[in-house]
Amino acid sequence: METDSVKLESSVWLGNKRHRALLSGWRFSWTELDKKNRDKNTISVPVSEVVAVMEGQVEIHPQKKTKDTDRDFTLFYVKRSNTSGGKGPLWSLGRSQFCCLSRDLRDQWVTQLRIALKTHCPSRPCRLLVFINPYGGKKKAKQIFHSSVAPLFELAGISSHVVVTERANQARDHILKKDLTGFDGVICVGGDGMFSELLHGVIGRTQQEAGVSEHDQSVMLQPCDLHIGIIPAGSTDCVCFATVGVNDPVTSALHIVIGDSQPLDVCSVHHCSTLVRYSVSLVGYGFYGDVLAESERHRWMGPLRYDYSGFLVYLCNRSYQGIVQYLPADSQITSPRDNSRCLSGCRVCSESTERLFPRSESCSSLYSRQLSQYSIESEDNWLSVEGRFRCVSLTCMSSSCPRSPKGLSPSAHLADGTGDLILVRNTNPLGFLTYLHRHTTTQDQFDLPFVEVHRVKAVRFSFLPGEEDDDEDQPNDSQNNTPGILEDPETLCNSDIESNSFGSKQHLAGNQREQGMTEKSRNKSDYLCGLCSSKRSATSVWNCDGEILPYAEISCRVHGQLVRLFARGVEEDPSSRKYNEGNRNCRGRCFSHS
Ligand SMILES: Nc1ncnc2c1ncn2[C@@H]1O[C@H](COP(=O)(O)OP(=O)(O)OP(=O)(O)O)[C@@H](O)[C@H]1O
């Protein structure tokens, strides 16, 4: 095969050791030779993981230095860390400096390697739009970008336009409104909140351009071309962890540089006929909603607030009445209890591309075919469960995090067009503690009599007649005109700042407090629920990727492979099976991982 043929082979020197270097098709390798010309160690790098080839002796740390020696060239590539110590598939920048017999040979190596890069990696980004949240996490995003990420982008010849945000939702509004011609992707340097801004911006813009209404639940959303990259620098970096396997800025930057592409399912959340939010990891009612709401009252504690609030909410021992309806996915294909793991190159996800996007002659016919596929789902296919629940969770991915390496649903897939619905019915405190604790162990958290899990395409949640919470505490259309995502960004932006009706968690929570806990309602029959400072209520709130939703009655739908990340899914790493040290930053998604 042409791609496997040898492009170049010669002797090269690394330091004073002679090697045989070989470029053949997809790989570049170099083998150390002993004095008798016998092969010793070989290092082999796929061309797709070569970051750059430079003439001369080049260093980028601590700062870029080039010594243009005639016979040398320097190869930069992705190096997997052998000493990740259970920290997942950590990548670093490998650097090898080769010396050739002549300048001519050196030039041949550089030319051939660069041709191979162009041929095998046509989808690497050239121009990126980078948003840095200077206030996210430990407020080190700027420093992380400039010291660890920018040098890698520069080395790979990527030009980046950097925007340091000055307010919440600036990144989302920028993506919705500004000219993005020439950009191959948008990058956030921050946490899950920043990722969510980019997600809403990219999906919203794509639908605007395609003339699709996001508020119409039955419509098939247009898949987004613009890739999203995440440089983890927040206090919660769960999306990064679940899609890369580790929260490390250099690893993420390298995935961006080599143009990795990971499709991702996205769940849209609607209330009546209005889009409320998009989610990729957790839409959770009951326990996870209560923990988030409680944690808002303790923001001053920093990330510790999630553990503290989780503890309080657990002690409150609440359960909530409701009706959960769901549209099951095809159980012949996969199930949430089939013990599979969605890892890099997942067969289920790649095969689902065929199911989600059947081949067709043109884009428009593809689009209309998907539309008709969804609209033929009749009400008869929906199933219904009602009762009292400790929690109701829908997740489009495993939602693994450092504290719960298996995640909420260990066999969930990143891009198969389905989500996993987990129903935890009311149970005694010990039973619920067992459920929570099993997220941190190898034991099956679904193997409990009060837990059920379903692979689904859509979910609806409503109350039994007469079960709704006091109207004064439940925002509804007349009380709360929460703008939809597609509305004019200017309006959104003003409403974010002025009325706090949609946007960052802080703002929304503040708004809810203002709206829900009016003086009148506070003086009525409220009482504190044990140690929790929140009012005991017949209803909980939804935690949607770390944001509190303003409505309890919602409907959710999973959109297969709606967006693409610069990632490749979690690479298998034997050491990652050891459940390592805790991370306190899961926004109430994995409380009890002590
Ligand atoms: N300049 C800014 N000032 C205030 N808020 C901002 C700014 N830029 C972004 N934000 C908002 O800050 C929120 C949190 O940011 P991010 O996710 O990066 O950090 P985090 O530390 O993980 O978040 P959190 O503090 O909520 O756990 C996001 O929802 C984002 O909309």
Image (cartoon, helix red, strand yellow):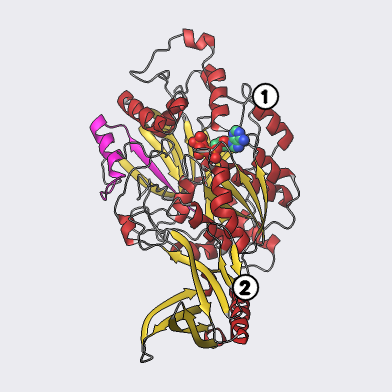
Quarter of the rendering occupied by the C terminus: top left
Quarter of the rendering occupied by the N terminus: bottom right
Q: Amino acid at mark 2?
A: Asp
The segment highlighted magenta reads 418-445
Q: Is residue 56 left or right of 460 when viewed as pictured?
A: right
**Residue 348 horizontal/vertical position (percent):** 44, 63
Towards the viewer: 104 or 161 = 104
From the image, tell me which residue sits under label 2. Answer: 68
Q: Would you say residue 437 sits in the magenta stretch?
A: yes
Relative vertical location of residue 491 with respect to residue 278 in this rendering, above or below: above
Callout 1 crowding tier (Cα within 10 Å): few <14, some 14–19, many ≥20: few
Element type at mark 1: helix
Q: Residue at x 26, y 51 (%)?
A: 442
Quarter of the image where one finds residue 508: top right
Towards the viewer: 51 or 337 = 51
**Residue 381 horizontal/vertical position (percent):** 47, 48
Q: Amino acid at mark 1?
A: Glu
Q: Residue at x 38, y 35 (%)?
A: 391
**Residue 188 horizontal/vertical position (percent):** 59, 47
Disc 1 residue lies near ligand 1 with CB under 8 A: no
- Would residue 582 be seen by someone viewing this image from the given angle? yes
Relative vertical location of residue 534 with respect to residue 343 in this rendering, above or below: above
Q: Would you say residue 244 sits in the magenta stretch?
A: no
Relative vertical location of residue 584 with respect to residue 558 in this rendering, above or below: above
Towards the viewer: 469 or 506 = 506
CA gap, disc 1 and disc 2 = 57 Å
- Would residue 215 be seen by someone viewing this image from the given angle? no
Element type at mark 2: loop
Callout 2 crowding tier (Cα within 10 Å): few <14, some 14–19, many ≥20: few
